[in-house]
Amino acid sequence: MKNNFLLLLAIALSLTACEPENRVYIEHQELSPDFEWLQKDKRTFKVPVESGVDYNLSLSFRYTTGYQHEVGRVKVTETSPSGEVQVYEYDLKVREANGDYIGNPGLDIWDSEHVVAANKQYEETGIYSYSLEHNMRQDPMNFVMEIGVILDIVK
């Protein structure tokens, strides 16, 4: 029993040790098991924030070797706790002009993080909703595995 507890403790510590201490939110959501993202397949994230705090809002993008484009275009719909809606479009650069992939590799899987709003301040404290969909001309977006939202406090 003691060994099981130590094993669980070690696993828990290893999972939390990799995150920056100023990270207040991170969530990734899987897309299709066929490594494609359909435009109609929106992913929604519920992010708790406080007003008066500077944040860096980032999007994470997990893709596989074979992704053909230099960028992944993402449309983000932000809804405040009171229901105010704003729409943003971001180009997530995932390949260099020479074709090299950008991000942290793991065999044929690449993880990239993209700061899309630096020093962002929220008007309201509460839960903001982020709905993400791809905004590429080609549908589906192939060789994509996950999309995510990350929120860090600016130090």
Image (spheres, rainbow, N blue to C red):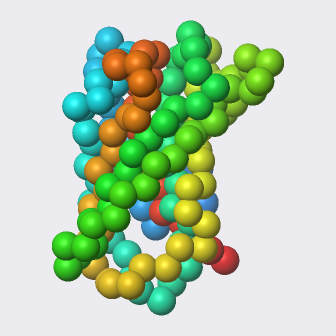
Above or below — where is 61 with respect to 150? above
Q: Residue furthest right?
A: 98
154 horizontally vs 33: left or right: right
Residue 115 position in % (x across, y down):
60, 55
Q: Residue furthest left?
A: 83
140 horizontally vs 95: left or right: left
Above or below — where is 11 with respect to 118? above
- Closest to the observer, 27 or 56: 56
Q: Quadrant of residue 41?
A: top left
75 horizontally vs 121: left or right: left
- Residue depicted at 77% across the width and 24% down the height: 97
Above or below — where is 125 with respect to 47? below
- Residue depicted at 32% across the width and 12% down the height: 34
Labels in figure, total? 0
- Asked if residue 44 shows in the view, the reply is yes
Q: Quadrant of residue 146?
A: top left
Residue 12 position in % (x across, y down):
44, 49
- Residue depicted at 32% across the width and 84% down the height: 125
Q: Quadrant of the N terminus?
A: top left
- Residue depicted at 42% across the width and 24% down the height: 137
- Closest to the observer, 98 or 148: 98
67 horizontally vs 78: left or right: right
- Asked if residue 13 shows in the view, the reply is no
- Closest to the observer, 74 or 26: 74
Q: Residue furthest front?
A: 137
Residue 28 position in % (x across, y down):
38, 42
Residue 154 position in % (x across, y down):
62, 74
Q: Quadrant of the C terminus?
A: bottom right
